Amino acid sequence: MALKSWQALTLLALVFAGCRGAADDYADFLGRRGVDGGDEQQVQSTLQDLSGRFVLHALLAGGLDLGLRVELAMDLTAQPIPLHARLWLATDDPDADPPLIETDSFVDPDGTFTLDAEPLMLAAGATPGLNTPVSANVVLHAATQSPDAWCGTATGDVVQPLALDLSGSTFAARRDDDGTLA
């Protein structure tokens, strides 16, 4: 039985339900009880070569569940380390369709990086539950987990059809060089 794209994205979300670990859960528990759990825990990140294709699943504030394909190109021999990213909808074919957006950034020595997807334009029907065009300015703050995975938080805002702050949004990306995950 073949999975539909929304089922594959849901399964991917469950697999990656976290850049968060037990320490984060415990700190959240302490915070709900009014106990100071210390400094906010940061996701561990390591410098890895992320050149290749990934499937990214984002849970954006406001209930937008977004699947993207991302192609990254890095040059680990350069300083600072340049990163070029191209983004498509998860249902698009990177070999045939133009990317939604291309952006350049730099990777920090610890493997963290930021991708600015500004403006990210989504057509009506581009993702499940989206029945109107959306324009957003999205900034992905990523931590590298391994050569095959990266994740993090997203900030920014939806500017059309309504104003919506994206703070609190999360995402996870998994290597998919052969295009079989979505």
Image (tube, rainbow, N blue to C red):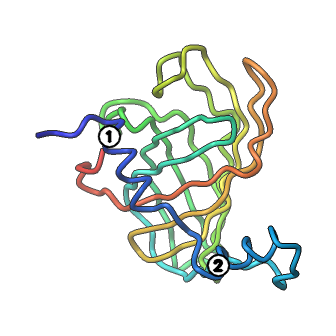
Q: How many marks?
A: 2
Kindly indicate the quadrant of the structure image that contains residue 27. bottom right
Give the quadrant of the C terminus. Answer: top left
Residue 4's x, y, as percent?
Answer: 26, 34
Kindly indicate the quadrant of the structure image that contains residue 175. bottom left
Question: Pointer 2: what residue?
Answer: 79
Question: Pointer 1: what residue?
Answer: 7
Out of 24 and 181, give the one closest to the viewer. 24
Q: Residues within 10 Å of mark 2 (few under 14, many from 20)?
A: few
Q: Residue at x 29, y 57 (%)?
A: 177
Q: Residue at x 45, y 38 (%)?
A: 88
Out of 80 and 114, give the one closest to the viewer. 114
As drawn, the label of residue 119 is none
Out of 39 and 99, give the one closest to the viewer. 39
Residue 133's x, y, as percent?
Answer: 61, 17
Task: Report the amino acid beneath label 2.
Answer: Gln
